[in-house]
Image: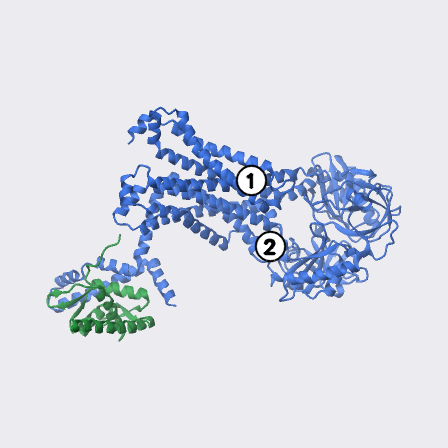
Chain colours: A blue, B green
């Protein structure tokens, strides 16, 4: 309380200076007047009385100054003086100021930029009530990396058996085609069980969600509009409830509007419809392709829930062969959404922190040299009575001013860099994040803290050193190197070695990431992404023969287009995430409970798909027109499937029964190559390809291989589809190369950012080496002159000076390589195709650094070798 | 940078024309006197000086050079508060009041002063 009052007064003295001054003036003037009055009363004439009073007071200004001192303004004035002094000093050496402020700006700007992302992605919670209780559940094939979607059967079992959850919801995102004024339009739609809104803790903004009845079979034509879609189509009209939304084959009753900002995964659905699960045949709607979200009961932790689910999963695995080899994956939703962004951001935080440390170390060195040059000046001030604390304080103020300058410049850099990063490759950093990326107050506070703490870190040591002047010795040897110099030199050498080591660590890291990126670019995907364009088709709830016929007609039409080499469809494109896990039976097995079947991935494709995607047919034949809805069932398997389930024999000609919507025994008519379906770094899984023409799906993607200029042909393809059926909605066209680019974006961004930061680090370290050697040369010009006069060759001088820089570089390199090896674990997860000890990265990084460092040392060394002995000796 | 002000008169004890040298002892005493005087009622600087003079039977004269810095220091310490109000002759003057902390300080300073002066008079008497 008292403390607060005092602070208030102190601040008042500081901030309302004018007011305080005026009051002080008035107070003293009042006293002066009373004194004058007293003298007048004693019989003096008014002017004499005034003079006498002034004499007695001993000068108003002096009194005021004393009062100011008493108010504790002396300290503040001192700081103001120091700031002014620092600014003058910095202006006088623009070269030093520019280098110092720029390196700080780079360090601080990099940190603020990355922190802005960290703040939005990792520190800002999801925008739902009690969002820490939101979890995501997936299934985890044992022995395999990664997770898969949830099987409806398991969802029902989990809901019945678990106690940890307040609510569980099963969701699948399937597009919805609505008929608008401008024709058919694809909406993003979440099919969900009734509990979705309870799980997210946000009731519908208007109307209601789905009832439990609506998520059981029966034609429940109801829809909850997404908030954005409601605004876009209905202008936020509240009377929309009870109206009907026209879809291709009928209409849906609008029963509610979802709250804004409700995201499933990373997208905000435009519509929600009930997911109808038949408890008797839960797999009739699909297999392991569903998303499952839950809200934990209050007081139940993620670990406790995971423990319970593990027990349930092993019970299920004993009961259903479908669940054999499957566990449950459970994670906090925020944790899960940022799972890919988190390690990236952590790594980048570490990288930019290292850059900042290098900038600080560099500046400490520069400031020390500056302090040494100013030793004479400081000594004079010490001799005139300035205390050591006062001198040190002044030097700290100088570094503080410098760091705030750097901080301000860094903030500008960060502002630009953040915006650039957001547009360039933020997707790779902010996967699943819902918070907007912007420089907000937290980030500004972060910058301020970083700037002031760097000032203390890099300012204190030089300040301590600089203020430790003994006026006598300092003034006597102001220009000669003495013991101070030797101590100073050792310390600066240590600083330079540190910088070099840190820069080398970053450079090695950048090398590893760049090599990883180049490996990824050249990874064998199993298909040929060049010259293919894709677009999504939602076939809707037409009868099966119509869905088959529609795709057939579209394929015929598209294949006939000029420049098209092949066309086919697949339900879920490679690299775009989902695939469907299901089970199958081999000859000799009796299909029984579908949950006892052997697991396999399953893709639903049309004829022409393998050609369109550029996948090799290794054995047998691809699907063709012979394979018809009413003909014998056929399937194709991939190489992994063949080797795993038919080891030692040919898969071709064998019969399998795949659990699907209309299971039937089918002959394996071909074996195709493996594809990295789940992503560039995923291992191909055993996959069976079913034929759209025999078990048509509702969603599919058209894949068109062209003779070049793939994206330019998209319009013609789209027109061909419209010619076949004007009501057919088509999603935006994307080339397979774009999907590959998306998959590469994260790795590309790691490599680019770390390489950029490593470059900055190397530059800073080079400045450090250059600064030290150049300083040494300046200090030893006299000595070099003598050596040259005594017959040393210029080569000798060059070698001696250069050798010093080379030694520092060498020690730093050794330390850096050692440290990088010690830190292998940090990047190992981000690497692909190389080991963290990859010798190429180390050798190239060390060599690249050595070239830069030697150049930095060679410049001053060359200058040293050109010293003119006569000038150098006359100099003193 | 730091001016030595030890020679500025803080509080003079009038002994005819001779003024004794101020001491640290006296400096602390001035705070005590100010606190004591305004404990009765709020006063402005001029009145405080007059009152000290009056209460000490014209023995103690507070120099302006010490009164106002002392007041400002006490204000910063939170022992006294200032407020502008009309004075006897209808001019605006800065009135100082004792705060709660100031009252406590006055008590402890008074006690300390009593101990100190008793001790000094003991020494003076016995020496």
Query: Subunit of mark 1?
Result: A
Quadrant of the rendering where the N terminus of chain A is positioned: bottom left
- Residue beneath label 2, please? A434
Q: Nearer the viewer, residue A285 or A789?
A: A789
Q: Is residue A382 left or right of residue A550?
A: left
Quadrant of the rendering where the C terminus of chain A is positioned: top left
Q: Looking at the image, which residue is at 33% across and 25% down?
A: A789
Answer whether labels 2 and 1 touch (C-beta < 8 Å): no
User: On screen, A72 above or below A588?
Assistant: below
Occupied quadrant, residue A32? bottom left
Q: Residue A596's spot in the image, x, y percent? A: 81, 56
**Which mark is drawn over residue A508?**
1
Q: Looking at the image, which residue is at 84% across and 43% down?
A: A651
Secondary element at tag 2: loop
Q: Is residue A120 visible?
A: yes
Occupied quadrant, residue A643? top right
């Amino acid at each position: 309380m008292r403390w607060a009052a005092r602070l208030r007064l102190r601040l008042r003295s500081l901030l309302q200076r004018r007011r305080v001054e005026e009051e002080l003036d008035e107070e003293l003037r009042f006293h002066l007047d009373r004194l004058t009055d007293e003298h007048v009363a004693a019989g003096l004439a008014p002017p004499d009385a005034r003079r006498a009073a002034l004499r007695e007071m001993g000068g108003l200004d002096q009194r005021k100054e004393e009062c100011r001192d008493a108010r504790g303004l002396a300290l503040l004035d001192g700081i103001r003086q120091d700031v002014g002094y620092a600014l003058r000093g910095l202006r006088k050496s623009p070269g030093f100021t520019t280098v110092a402020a720029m390196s700080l700006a780079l360090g601080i700007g990099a940190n603020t930029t990355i922190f802005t992302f960290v703040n939005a992605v990792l520190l800002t919670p999801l925008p739902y009530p009690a969002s820490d209780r939101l979890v995501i559940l997936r299934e985890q094939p044992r022995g395999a990396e990664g997770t898969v979607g949830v099987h409806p059967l398991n969802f029902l079992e989990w809901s019945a058996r678990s106690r940890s959850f307040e609510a569980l919801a099963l969701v699948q995102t399937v597009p919805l085609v609505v008929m608008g004024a401008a024709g058919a339009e694809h909406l993003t739609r979440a099919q969900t069980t009734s509990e979705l809104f309870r799980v997210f803790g946000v009731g519908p903004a208007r109307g209601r969600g789905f009832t439990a009845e609506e998520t059981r079979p029966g034609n429940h034509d109801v829809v909850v509009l997404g908030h954005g879609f409601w605004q876009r189509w209905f202008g936020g009209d509240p009377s929309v409830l009870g109206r009907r939304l026209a879809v291709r084959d009928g209409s849906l009753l609008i029963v509610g509007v979802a709250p804004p900002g409700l995201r499933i995964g990373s997208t905000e659905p435009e519509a929600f419809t009930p997911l109808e699960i038949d408890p008797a045949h839960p797999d009739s709607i699909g297999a392991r392709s569903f998303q499952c979200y839950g809200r934990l009961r209050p007081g139940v932790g993620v670990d406790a829930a995971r423990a319970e689910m593990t027990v349930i999963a092993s019970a299920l695995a004993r009961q259903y062969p479908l669940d054999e080899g499957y566990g449950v994956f459970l994670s906090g939703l925020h944790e899960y959404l940022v799972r890919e962004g988190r390690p990236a951001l952590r790594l980048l935080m570490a990288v930019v922190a290292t850059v900042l440390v290098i900038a600080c170390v560099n500046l400490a060195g520069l400031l020390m040299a500056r302090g040494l040059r100013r030793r004479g000046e400081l000594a004079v001030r010490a001799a005139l009575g300035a205390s050591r604390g006062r001198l040190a304080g002044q030097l700290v103020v100088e570094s503080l001013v410098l760091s705030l300058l750097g901080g301000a410049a860094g903030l500008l850099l960060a502002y630009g860099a953040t915006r650039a990063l957001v547009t360039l490759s933020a997707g790779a950093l902010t996967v699943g994040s819902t918070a907007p990326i912007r420089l907000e107050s937290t980030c500004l506070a972060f910058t301020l803290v970083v700037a002031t703490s760097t000032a203390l870190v890099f300012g204190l040591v030089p300040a301590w050193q600089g203020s430790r002047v003994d006026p006598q010795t300092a003034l006597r040897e102001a220009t000669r190197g003495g013991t101070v110099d030797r101590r100073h030199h050792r310390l600066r050498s240590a600083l330079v070695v540190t910088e070099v080591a840190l820069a080398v660590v970053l450079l090695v890291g950048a090398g590893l990431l760049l090599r990883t990126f180049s490996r990824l670019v050249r990874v064998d995907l199993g298909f040929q992404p060049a010259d293919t364009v894709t677009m999504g088709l939602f076939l809707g709830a037409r009868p099966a023969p119509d869905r088959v016929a529609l795709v057939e007609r579209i394929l015929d039409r598209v294949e006939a287009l000029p420049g098209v080499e092949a066309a086919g469809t697949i339900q879920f494109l490679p690299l775009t995430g989902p695939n469907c896990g299901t089970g199958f039976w081999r000859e000799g097995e009796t299909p029984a409970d579908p949950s006892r079947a052997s697991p396999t991935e399953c893709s639903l494709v049309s004829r022409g798909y393998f050609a369109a995607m550029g996948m090799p047919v290794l054995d047998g034949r691809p699907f063709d027109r012979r394979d018809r809805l009413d003909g014998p069932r056929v399937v194709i398997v991939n190489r992994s499937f063949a080797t795993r389930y038919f080891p030692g024999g040919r898969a071709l000609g064998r019969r399998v029964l795949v659990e699907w919507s209309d299971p039937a025994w089918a002959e394996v008519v071909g074996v195709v190559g493996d594809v990295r379906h789940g992503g560039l770094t995923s291992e191909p899984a055993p996959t069976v390809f079913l034929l759209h023409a025999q078990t048509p799906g509702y969603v599919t993607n058209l894949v068109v291989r062209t003779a070049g200029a793939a994206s330019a042909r998209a319009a013609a393809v789209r027109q061909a589809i419209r010619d076949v059926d004007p009501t057919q909605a088509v999603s935006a066209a994307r080339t397979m190369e774009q999907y590959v680019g998306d998959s590469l974006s994260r790795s590309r961004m790691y490599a680019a950012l770390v390489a950029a930061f490593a470059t900055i680090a190397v530059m800073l370290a080079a400045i450090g080496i250059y600064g030290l050697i150049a300083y040494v040369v300046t200090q030893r010009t006299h000595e070099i002159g003598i050596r040259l006069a005594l017959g040393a060759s210029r080569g000798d001088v060059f070698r001696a000076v250069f050798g010093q820089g080379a030694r520092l570089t060498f020690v730093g390199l050794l330390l850096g390589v050692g440290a990088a090896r010690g830190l292998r674990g940090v990047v190992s997860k981000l690497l692909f195709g190389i080991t963290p000890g990859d010798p190429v990265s180390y050798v190239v990084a060390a060599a690249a650094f050595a070239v830069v460092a030697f150049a930095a040392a060679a410049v001053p060394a060359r200058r040293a070798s050109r010293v003119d002995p006569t000038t150098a000796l006359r100099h003193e | 940078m730091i001016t030595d002000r030890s020679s500025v008169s803080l509080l003079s004890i009038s002994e005819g024309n001779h003024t004794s040298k101020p001491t640290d002892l006296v400096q602390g005493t001035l705070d005590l006197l100010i606190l004591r005087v305004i404990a009765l009622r709020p006063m402005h600087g001029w009145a405080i000086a007059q009152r000290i003079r009056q209460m000490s039977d014209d023995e103690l004269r507070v120099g302006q050079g010490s009164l106002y810095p002392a007041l400002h220091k006490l204000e910063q310490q939170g022992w006294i508060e200032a407020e502008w109000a009309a004075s006897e002759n209808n001019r605006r003057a800065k009135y100082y009041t004792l705060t709660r902390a100031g009252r406590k300080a006055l008590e402890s300073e008074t006690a300390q002063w009593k101990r100190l002066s008793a001790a000094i008079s003991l020494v003076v008497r016995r020496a």
